[in-house]
Image (cartoon, rainbow, N blue to C red):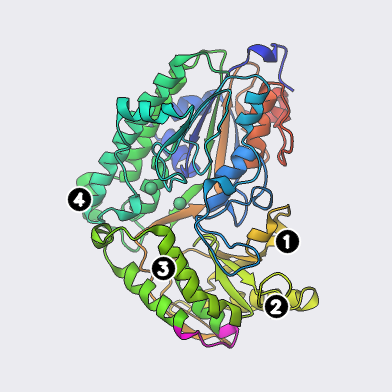
Amino acid sequence: MPGSMSAAGRRVVVVTLDACDRDLVLDWARAGELPEFAALLGQSARAFMCAPRAFYVGGVWPSFATATSAATHGFVAFRQLVPGTYREPLCPAESMSGDPFWEHLARAGRRVAVVDVPRIRVSRDLNGIHLADWGNHDPVHPLPVSWPPPLAAEIERRYGRSPVGDCDLVDHSARGLSHLCDALAARIETKTAIGLDLFAREPWDLFTLGFSESHCVGHQCWHLHDPGHARFDPAVLASSGDPILRVYRALDTALGRIVTAAANDTHVCVVLSHGMGSHYDAAHLLDAVLVRLDGQTPTPAARLFHRINKVWKRLPPGVHRLLPSLDRSAKHRIRAELLEADRRARRFFPVTNSETHPGIRINLRGREPAGRVEPGAEFDAVCREIREELLALVDAERGTPVVRAVLDRRELCDGPRADVLPDLAIDWIRTAPVHAVRSPRVGTVRGQYHGIRSGDHRPGGMFMVRGPGIAPGQIEREIEILDVAPTVCAIFGSPLPGAEGHPLDELWQGARVRA
Ligand SMILES: [Zn+2]
Ligand SMILES: [Zn+2]
């Protein structure tokens, strides 16, 4: 437990860096590119962190905030299956179960300020302030919202709107991506100013500030950073430099300004949620593979949906921007209508989770409205069959396997919201772009990846904490992101109820870390 100083006077600053890749940070800090990170690494106790397996792409921040697994908080994707139906409507921020740890601290009498932790609903009636989605990747609120409600408008009056829109709609020419990076740098600058302004307004017990630019630049510009990427262009790198390094440098400067603003007796925590690498997977071929495994032919409506979807994805982002902004929920309703009959007819079908870990739902009798698989032995046999057949898939051009593992939700996590999660999730081997897969039973399935993102997520993250009584050094074991909130609450001497993670007790027992 925390050392001798009274927990009553403790103050904690938490900086969250969304999908900021820890290997890049460590390499660049060592190379002298990120001096603030390097300084903080030297002063902090730090631990490598694994994001929640299979559900981290959409679920890592809810898991961070609530210290619970996806099966407990139930919020893992932008659209999710409604149990008892075949529909996957857009999933609002309010569908997360459980309370973020700052609400617990606020109820315990602490004054808290929270700015832009991604994918978390705004905390109303908070003893403090919460500004949500002023500038995040994939915001869960259509416009910035706040507690107290007038704060968001006040911040917009003073600092304007976020200079970055939906990063998936940017023009992917060298010029377009360079504009994106300018906008991301501007967003970091303004976010820092907002953060420092709010930080100075009162002596907060807990102050949490989130940056999301590492997320956007990783998805959109990975091919300009990684010489091994299929779309890498040395000319662009030579003329405008590595866009990812540029954004990480701006984050480094921001981090330095925030750390400087925090007094020496303040605990400073930095959370790197998950990482980034090449967007190589066969998610775009999965539905066709599953249809063949199931021995089905798609319904005419499903074929229509896949045709529309393919055309839609091939349109350049400029056209997406120009088209009348089709109401997003209407788009998802049309999708649901077209896919419903197809799903009813199948033994299993893909459900939204992420391209990193696509989900598969078994059409289970008693759970799904037109269930075709009996619970128990038949369910297990179908899961086994899918696992064996997907593991048998190879890249048709290289002859190498494309699936590392087929994960069973029951072996990953369990909780009251488990019914919204897929039954199975695929873990790809992501070494090269996949244009065709084959196996003895499936035959060959071909198709190009038409998405524009060149980077996609990796599960590794990192946690750093600096403060009174905490010895710097690397914690030997890998921790979970579920451990971070209980650790922050432990600094306040205020155990977090319902947490599925555990405080890092070794922080206060210096012997277990090495410098
Ligand atoms: Zn992402
Ligand atoms: Zn983005």
Q: Is residue 349 above or below residue 333?
A: below
**Residue carrying label 1:** 410
Identify the element where label 2 is drawn. Answer: helix
Q: CA distance from mark 4 to mark 2?
A: 49 Å
Q: CA distance from mark 3 to mark 1?
A: 30 Å
- First reached walking from the N terminus: tag 1 or tag 4: 4
**Residue carrying label 3:** 433
Tell me the crowding category of disc 2: few under 14, some 14 to 19, or many 20 or more residues within 10 angstroms, Cα based: some
Q: Is residue 253 above or below residue 313?
A: above
Q: At label 3, which amino acid type do we have?
A: Pro
**The label number, if any, that marks residue 175 in the structure image:** 4
* Ligand 1 neighbours mark 3 (CB distance < 8 Å): no
Q: At label 2, which amino acid type do we have?
A: Val
- First reached walking from the N terminus: tag 2 or tag 1: 2
- The x, y position of residue 67, in whole percent, is 66, 40
**Residue carrying label 2:** 382
Tell me the crowding category of disc 1: few under 14, some 14 to 19, or many 20 or more residues within 10 angstroms, Cα based: few
Residue 90 appearing in the image = yes
Q: Which residues are magenta?
A: 292-300
- The x, y position of residue 362, in whole percent, is 66, 73
